[in-house]
Amino acid sequence: QVQLVESGGGLVQAGGSLRLSCAASGRTFSTYAMGWFRQAPGKERELVAAISWSGGSTNYADSVKGRFFISRDNAKNTVYLLMNSLKPEETAVYYCAAGRVWGDTVLVVADAYAYWGQGTQVTVSS
Protein backbone atom coordinates (compact mmCIF):
# COMPACT_ATOMS: atom_id res chain seq x y z
CA GLN A 1 0.00 0.00 0.00
CA VAL A 2 2.84 2.37 0.86
CA GLN A 3 6.45 2.34 -0.29
CA LEU A 4 9.10 4.30 1.59
CA VAL A 5 12.55 5.30 0.35
CA GLU A 6 15.08 7.00 2.60
CA SER A 7 17.84 9.27 1.40
CA GLY A 8 20.33 11.75 2.78
CA GLY A 9 22.54 9.42 4.75
CA GLY A 10 26.30 9.48 4.49
CA LEU A 11 29.49 10.37 6.30
CA VAL A 12 29.51 13.37 8.60
CA GLN A 13 31.98 14.73 11.13
CA ALA A 14 31.15 14.67 14.83
CA GLY A 15 29.26 17.81 15.73
CA GLY A 16 27.94 18.18 12.23
CA SER A 17 24.40 18.04 10.90
CA LEU A 18 22.56 15.89 8.43
CA ARG A 19 19.01 15.85 7.11
CA LEU A 20 17.36 12.60 6.15
CA SER A 21 14.38 12.41 3.81
CA CYS A 22 11.76 9.72 3.37
CA ALA A 23 9.73 9.76 0.18
CA ALA A 24 6.41 7.92 0.26
CA SER A 25 4.50 6.52 -2.68
CA GLY A 26 1.42 4.40 -3.13
CA ARG A 27 -1.81 5.07 -1.24
CA THR A 28 -0.57 8.25 0.32
CA PHE A 29 -4.10 9.64 0.44
CA SER A 30 -4.56 7.55 3.56
CA THR A 31 -3.72 8.78 7.04
CA TYR A 32 -0.33 7.65 8.35
CA ALA A 33 1.74 8.40 11.37
CA MET A 34 5.45 8.33 10.60
CA GLY A 35 8.58 7.53 12.51
CA TRP A 36 12.34 7.27 12.29
CA PHE A 37 14.21 4.36 13.84
CA ARG A 38 17.88 3.47 13.95
CA GLN A 39 19.86 0.32 14.49
CA ALA A 40 23.55 0.20 15.26
CA PRO A 41 25.64 -2.99 14.95
CA GLY A 42 24.96 -5.32 17.86
CA LYS A 43 22.16 -3.16 19.24
CA GLU A 44 18.38 -3.22 19.22
CA ARG A 45 16.37 -1.10 16.84
CA GLU A 46 15.23 2.01 18.65
CA LEU A 47 12.77 4.80 18.04
CA VAL A 48 14.42 8.11 17.24
CA ALA A 49 11.43 10.31 16.50
CA ALA A 50 7.76 10.03 15.58
CA ILE A 51 5.21 12.41 14.12
CA SER A 52 1.45 12.41 13.72
CA TRP A 53 -0.35 12.64 10.39
CA SER A 54 -0.92 16.39 10.67
CA GLY A 55 2.50 17.04 12.14
CA GLY A 56 0.89 18.51 15.22
CA SER A 57 2.31 15.95 17.63
CA THR A 58 5.85 14.59 17.91
CA ASN A 59 7.80 12.24 20.13
CA TYR A 60 11.57 11.95 20.56
CA ALA A 61 13.98 9.60 22.22
CA ASP A 62 15.50 11.22 25.29
CA SER A 63 18.97 10.98 23.79
CA VAL A 64 18.09 13.18 20.81
CA LYS A 65 15.74 15.75 22.34
CA GLY A 66 16.80 19.26 21.49
CA ARG A 67 19.11 18.08 18.71
CA PHE A 68 16.94 16.13 16.28
CA PHE A 69 13.76 17.42 14.68
CA ILE A 70 11.16 15.47 12.73
CA SER A 71 8.86 17.17 10.25
CA ARG A 72 6.64 16.28 7.33
CA ASP A 73 5.30 17.85 4.17
CA ASN A 74 2.21 15.94 3.15
CA ALA A 75 1.93 17.87 -0.12
CA LYS A 76 5.29 16.38 -1.08
CA ASN A 77 4.64 13.00 0.58
CA THR A 78 7.91 13.41 2.42
CA VAL A 79 9.07 13.10 6.02
CA TYR A 80 12.33 14.60 7.26
CA LEU A 81 14.69 14.09 10.14
CA LEU A 82 17.09 16.93 10.87
CA MET A 83 19.98 15.72 13.00
CA ASN A 84 22.20 18.29 14.68
CA SER A 85 25.35 17.93 16.79
CA LEU A 86 25.82 14.34 15.71
CA LYS A 87 27.86 11.99 17.88
CA PRO A 88 29.97 9.01 16.79
CA GLU A 89 27.81 6.64 18.84
CA GLU A 90 24.85 7.61 16.66
CA THR A 91 26.37 5.80 13.70
CA ALA A 92 23.62 3.45 12.54
CA VAL A 93 21.25 2.51 9.78
CA TYR A 94 18.29 4.85 9.96
CA TYR A 95 14.87 3.59 8.90
CA CYS A 96 11.69 5.41 7.98
CA ALA A 97 8.41 3.77 8.96
CA ALA A 98 4.69 4.41 8.45
CA GLY A 99 1.64 3.17 10.31
CA ARG A 100 -2.01 3.69 9.48
CA VAL A 101 -3.98 5.63 12.06
CA TRP A 102 -7.56 6.85 12.30
CA GLY A 103 -6.79 9.88 14.38
CA ASP A 104 -3.99 12.39 14.73
CA THR A 105 -1.80 10.33 17.01
CA VAL A 106 1.86 9.35 17.19
CA LEU A 107 3.08 5.75 17.20
CA VAL A 108 5.95 5.00 19.56
CA VAL A 109 6.45 1.23 19.29
CA ALA A 110 7.96 -0.52 16.29
CA ASP A 111 5.21 -3.14 16.10
CA ALA A 112 2.67 -0.41 15.39
CA TYR A 113 4.33 0.40 12.08
CA ALA A 114 3.30 -1.64 9.05
CA TYR A 115 5.57 -0.16 6.38
CA TRP A 116 9.33 0.27 6.41
CA GLY A 117 11.95 1.72 4.14
CA GLN A 118 15.19 0.00 3.23
CA GLY A 119 17.29 2.17 5.52
CA THR A 120 20.06 4.67 4.95
CA GLN A 121 23.50 4.49 6.54
CA VAL A 122 24.64 7.36 8.73
CA THR A 123 28.27 7.32 9.79
CA VAL A 124 29.56 9.91 12.26
CA SER A 125 33.34 10.14 12.37
CA SER A 126 35.50 11.58 15.12
Image: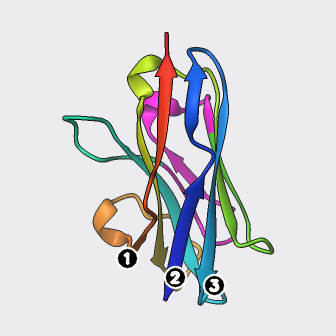
Disc 1 designates what residue?
114
User: Magenta span covers which residues?
Assistant: 49-68
The answer to whether residue 126 is visible is yes
* Of the image marks 1 and 3, the number of the one nearer the N terminus: 3
The residue at 42%/29% (across/down) is: 91
Q: Please identify the residue farthest to the left as the structure is shown.
A: 42
Q: Secondary structure at mark 2?
A: strand
Label whose residue precedes the other's in the sequence (3 or 2): 2
Going by the numbered disc 1, the residue's amino acid type is Ala
**Amino acid type at image mark 3:** Thr
Helix, strand or loop under label 1: loop
Furthest residue toward right: 75
Q: Residue at x 53, y 70 (%)?
A: 4
Horizontally, residue 39 falls left or right of residue 55, namely left
Left or right of 112: which side holds 4? right
Label 2 sits on residue: 2
Q: Which residue is mark 3?
A: 28
Distance (Cα) linking label 3 and label 2: 7 Å
Is the residue under label 2 in contact with that under label 3 (CB below 8 Å)? Answer: yes
